[in-house]
Amino acid sequence: MSPFNPTPNADPLWIELGARRYPIAFGAWNAASASSALALVVTNEVVAPLYAARLQEVLKRQHRLVDVLVLPDGEVHKSWPSVSLILDRLLELGADRHAVVYALGGGVVGDLAGFAAAIYMRGLAFVQVPTTLLAQVDSSVGGKTGFNHARGKNLIGAFHQPQAVWIDLQTLATLPDREYRAGLAEMVKYGPIADPAFFDWLEREADALNARDPAILSVAVRRSCEIKAAVVAADEHEGGLRAVLNLGHTFGHALEAGLGYGELLHGEAVAMGMVMAAQASVDALGCDPALLRRLQALLARLGLSTVAPRLGADRFIALMMGDKKNQGGAIRYVLLEGMGRPVLAKLPHALALQAIAAHSVAQ
Ligand SMILES: NC(=O)c1ccc[n+]([C@@H]2O[C@H](COP(=O)([O-])OP(=O)(O)OC[C@H]3O[C@@H](n4cnc5c(N)ncnc54)[C@H](O)[C@@H]3O)[C@@H](O)[C@H]2O)c1
Ligand SMILES: O=C(O)C(=O)C[C@@H](O)[C@H](O)[C@H](O)COP(=O)(O)O
Ligand SMILES: [Zn+2]
């Protein structure tokens, strides 16, 4: 992975997957990579009035027909019925295997549209057009698609890489504050799992990030994509290394499912989960407690709570028992031996519960 360079750079970033590669493009949307076939823009009721017309205008230069499907909004709709709506629309349009799906929205739209593209006629090309910070720094890159189940987050899905990712930071201008901060959590994640220098820089630039400074944001979004692209290129289907991108998620996904999808935003749950993982790393691996303190301080400065709502111990463990990283019935957590030194490890339930209790609201 290239060393962190805190200089704004709008050149396309390429993610290399063996013989395949695709661009992560920054700036105004450009349809140069599209085909002349049918295009279906999948978006939701919040994003559609803001950006669908703009994207349609860009796509009309390349596609004979551009249709738009507006899904209901929210994590609670990251479910099979939403996927079914996409598939039904593609069939109604008579889409053949050359049709292209465009996911215009945040991670929920991207995961749903990407999964529908993965299974329609055994696979359509799709383009990620992320409009939340979280989608721009994480979900639009790497090809994880799918939806939630009552038993847990993202339990149904497929790896299906986009043909391109189009990141226009201008779309963040309309993003609500809480959603923006949720994206900062996934950005912070890249420090402990891969890049201590990036974490140091995030600490220095926290005020600028809170102010949504465009130059600082462009550096932070690009670095996040660089790190994610490097991890995915090394382990596309999560045979090992890619699990590091899951820091905080074993705990975080249990919080999301246990409290009811949408109660906590994904990024909020990840922030809480990362602190629990750092606590467990101190308790179980002898990780320097200064890392935990720095992580708590940075997340708090970025307006993210590091104390989770209480979820019963049995419920917490039961939900984590369904995590996709688990092996042989044992929960596997992403922990930290130090800053930039992640490790996939099992924990006695007692230690996991100790970390949870230390960072949950008092009974
Ligand atoms: N596939 C992956 O690799 C991956 C990675 C991280 C997260 N995820 C998934 O992503 C989801 C979270 O994504 P998210 O945080 O983007 O949430 P989201 O998709 O729910 O979007 C957040 C909210 O902002 C609205 N919105 C989107 N863009 C906007 C804009 N420009 N202006 C105003 N409002 C806008 C949305 O309609 C929604 O109400 C979770 O389901 C999580 O599991 C997937
Ligand atoms: O891309 C990955 O790999 C990640 O783990 C990124 C996470 O931020 C993201 O939330 C992902 O959807 C979680 O993966 P999952 O396999 O636990 O669903
Ligand atoms: Zn995540």
Image (cartoon, helix red, strand yellow):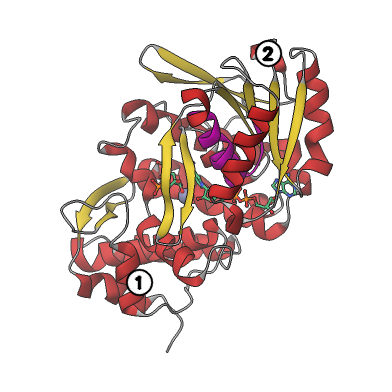
Residue displayed at 58% across by 49% down: 81
Pick the residue in front: 120 or 92.
92
Quadrant placement of the N terminus: top left
Please state if 322 lies on the left or on the right of 177 as rendered: left
Q: Is residue 122 above or below residue 77?
A: above
Quadrant placement of the C terminus: bottom left
Which residue in the protein does label 1 denote? 316
Q: Is residue 205 visible?
A: no
Q: Residues in magenta?
A: 102-118
In the image, residue 53 lies at what x, y percent?
84, 32
Q: Is residue 356 above or below residue 204?
A: below
177 drawn magenta: no
Which residue in the protein does label 2 denote? 37
Pick the residue in front: 288 or 220.
220
- How many numbered marks have been drawn onto this rendered protein structure? 2
In the image, residue 312 lies at what x, y percent?
37, 80
Question: Looking at this rendering, what residue extends furthest in the bottom direction?
Answer: 363
